[in-house]
Image (cartoon, grey):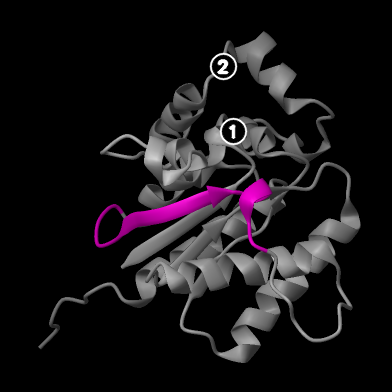
Amino acid sequence: MKVFVAGEGSDEIGDFVHDPTYRRPECEGGILEALLRRSRAVGWVIADGCPWRRVRKFAFGRDLHGREFRNVLGIVDQAAEAGCDIVAFVRDRDGEIDRQAAIEIAIAEVARLGLNVAVIGGVAVETVDAWILACLGEVSSEDVRDPKSVLQTRFGLSKGAEKVEVIANANLGAVPTDARSLNIWRERAKTVLERDEPRENSS
C-alpha cells in the first residue's frame, strides 16, 4: 500500500515537507509515519506528501464548507494522482472549532463518494505537540495552551526526531482517554491499515 502524507510541517511529515527535488533519497515521514508504524509496521510505504500550505484546493460544487473542506478533498486528489491508496494527514486546530468541523465533514464526504483513496486524518487539539504529551502519559493534554513549550521546558523535547522517538517508545495503551483527537486518529489508522492486512489461514 502506498501512503500520501500531509501536515503542518517537518515535525508531522519529515522530509516530505520539501519539494521532491530537495528530498533525501530515503525520506522519513515524521510523527505521522511513527504513528502509522505503531498501527502496522510493514506492508505499506510513504510514496509522497506535502505540507498543508502546498495542498491544492479542490473545487467541489457549491463552497458550503470553506477552505479546509477543499483542502482535504485536494489532498485526496493529489494522492490519487500520485498513485497512493491512503492519505494520512493531521491539521492543528489552534482554537478553530470551525476548522475541525469542516475537516470532519470532508472526511465523511470522501467516504460517501466511494473514492479509491482511504483517509486516515483528523485535527490535533490544539496542536500535534499535545499528542506527544499524551504519548508521554500526560492527562488533559488537549487543554494545554502551549504544548510545544511544555515539551521543551518539562521534557527537553524540541526536535521532530525527538518527538518521533517518543512515539516509537511509548506505551500507547496508556494514552489517556481524554486525548480524544489522538485516539480518534489512531483508531482510523488501525481500521485502514488492518483492512488489507493478510490473515493467517485458520483451517
Name the quarter where the C terminus is drawn. bottom left
Residue occupying the point 58% across, 17% down? 158
Specify the quadrant of the image occupied by residue 202.
Answer: bottom left
Q: Secondary structure at mark 2?
A: loop
Crowding at mark 1 (Cα within 10 Å: few <14, some 14-19, many 20+): many
Specify the quadrant of the image occupied by residue 43.
Answer: bottom left
Q: Nearer the viewer, residue 155 or 71?
A: 71
Per the image, is 169 magenta? no
Q: Secondary structure at mark 1?
A: helix
Q: Residue furthest left?
A: 203
> Is the Cβ of the residue at disc 1 closer than 8 Å to that at disc 2?
yes
* N-term mark: 1 or 2: 1
The residue singled out by tag 2 in the image is 157
- How far apart are the two marked residues, 1 and 2, measured between alpha carbons? 10 Å
Name the quarter where the N terminus is drawn. bottom left
Q: How many marks?
A: 2
In this image, 202 relative to 161: left or right? left
The residue singled out by tag 1 in the image is 132
Can see residue 176?
yes
Per the image, is 46 magenta? yes
Residue occupying the point 72% across, 18% down? 150
Instruction: Give the residues in magenta.
Output: 41-56
Residue occupying the point 45% across, 32% down? 164
Q: What amino acid is at disc 1?
A: Ile
Q: Nearer the viewer, residue 73 or 107?
A: 73
Q: What amino acid is at disc 2?
A: Leu
Can see residue 191?
no
Residue occupying the point 69% across, 79% down? 108
Crowding at mark 2 (Cα within 10 Å: few <14, some 14-19, many 20+): some
Residue 198, x across and y down, in percent: 22, 75
Specify the quadrant of the image occupied by residue 12.
Answer: top right
Residue 59, x across and y down, in percent: 73, 77
